Amino acid sequence: MKLDWINSAGGPLVCASYVTAEAWQGVAGSSIGDVRSDYDRACEQFDYVGVVRCDSSEVLILGDEPMQSAFFLSSEKVFIARWVACESKEAAAIALATLPANLPSIEEATLFRLDSLGLVMFDAAEYTTSSACSSHINLPPGTYAVSTKEYKHQGRFHFLVHELQPVEGKIS
């Protein structure tokens, strides 16, 4: 399994559709006309995941602590892995390739509406178009329940794992 790990400069990461990501202003301004920048609003998310408005849509914020993160697929499901501790990228790939199906959630699921095809992850401080550090995954538009799980093996690895589960009957 090849994982494309990305980092932030110290703040949260943002996940948005390709179209919505173009509206994100980072530290430079607000996509919704707020006095706070988009980055400031992202930094106000203290849970593991949160949602904020961007233009007329939503973005998913990976809050709590800045951790390198990557999209991955397992059993045809879409996940975001957030690296808490692991000895190497190779060990991380092996651990995530054997992700158990029954990990319990550690916080309430967050609903996130993806308005158009594709999901890009990037540093909340940046404009997505100017960010050299981003990751992409093809994901159809719709509403997703984003759950947070903890996956760890004492002394070997520790990840937060967010599962993006489509919500039946909800269309963006």
Image: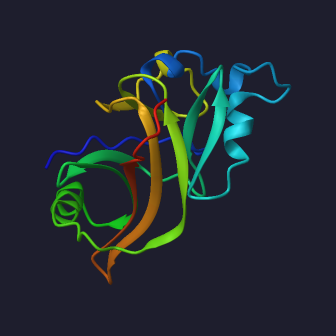
Q: Which residue occupies the extreme bottom position in the image?
A: 154
Query: Which residue corresponds to the image point at 74% horizontal and 21% vertical from the top-left?
Result: 32
- The quadrant where residue 87 appears: bottom left
* Residue 121 drawn above or below residue 66: above
* 170 relative to 53 in the view: left or right: left
- The quadrant where residue 126 appears: top right
Q: Where does the image place residue 109, in percent across and percent down from the top left?
A: 52, 59
Query: Which residue corresponds to the image point at 53% horizontal and 42% vertical from the top-left?
Result: 112
Q: Where does the image place residue 55, in percent across and percent down from the top left?
A: 65, 20
Query: Which residue corresponds to the image point at 16% horizontal and 66% vertical from the top-left?
Result: 98
Query: Which residue corresponds to the image point at 60% horizontal and 22% vertical from the top-left?
Result: 24
Q: Where does the image place residue 62, in percent across and percent down from the top left?
A: 53, 48
* 130 relative to 138 in the view: left or right: right
Q: Which residue occupies the extreme right position in the image?
A: 35
Q: Where does the image place residue 168, in percent across and percent down from the top left?
A: 39, 46
Q: Answer whether residue 25 is visible to the viewer in this image.
A: yes
Relative depth, front residue between 120 and 109? 109
**Colour mapping used in the image:** rainbow
Q: How many marks?
A: 0
- The quadrant where residue 124 appears: top right
Relative depth, front residue between 35 and 87? 35
* Residue 78 drawn above or below residue 94: above
Q: Answer whether residue 14 is visible to the viewer in this image.
A: no
Relative depth, front residue between 80 and 43? 80
* Residue 48 drawn above or below residue 129: below
* 77 relative to 110 in the view: left or right: left
